[in-house]
Image (spheres, rainbow, N blue to C red):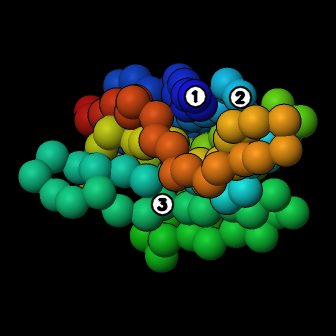
Amino acid sequence: QVQLVESGGRLMQPGGSLRLSCAASGNIFRVDDMGWYRQAPGKERELVVIATPDGATRYADFVKGRFTVSRDNAKNTVYLQMASLKSEDTAVYYCYANVWIKTGQYTNTNREVWGQGTLVTVSS
């Protein structure tokens, strides 16, 4: 099994900066894409950013220039540095990873894994 554990969410004032972290652990062979989604109250979950192991990224338009994703592939960890926070950034932020899980000596299986979510509230 593989788990994603997020941390860093908290109450922030508009204009502030915050960093979220997410670490994958378990019987991991390889982690491919990692990234972040978010779900605001009353809305559907939406993509924030996805990052490949070699550094390619895809950001949602609403965070371009404000949020930056980074990865530590050796630690199977992804970070989300958020700046210039707005009230509309208030949401539960979910970590996502596409993981190859060891299932045998020579076999692996691919799974999409989600974290439990961390709440970011932006309010004055």
Circle 2 packing at 10 Å, graded few (<14), some (14-19), many (20+), is some
- Earlier in the chain: of badge 3 and badge 2, it is 2
- Earlier in the chain: of badge 2 and badge 1, it is 1
Name the residue tied to disc 3.
Answer: 48
Circle 1 packing at 10 Å, graded few (<14), some (14-19), many (20+), is few
Secondary structure at badge 1 equals loop
Secondary structure at badge 3 equals strand
Name the residue tied to disc 2.
Answer: 27
Q: Amino acid at mark 1?
A: Gln
Name the foreground residue: 70 vs 102.
Answer: 102
Task: Report the Cα–Cα distance between label 3 and label 2.
Answer: 27 Å
- Earlier in the chain: of badge 1 and badge 3, it is 1
Task: Report the Cα–Cα distance between label 1 and label 3.
Answer: 25 Å
Name the residue tied to disc 1.
Answer: 1
Residue 18 occupies quadrant: top right
Name the foreground residue: 62 vs 2.
Answer: 2
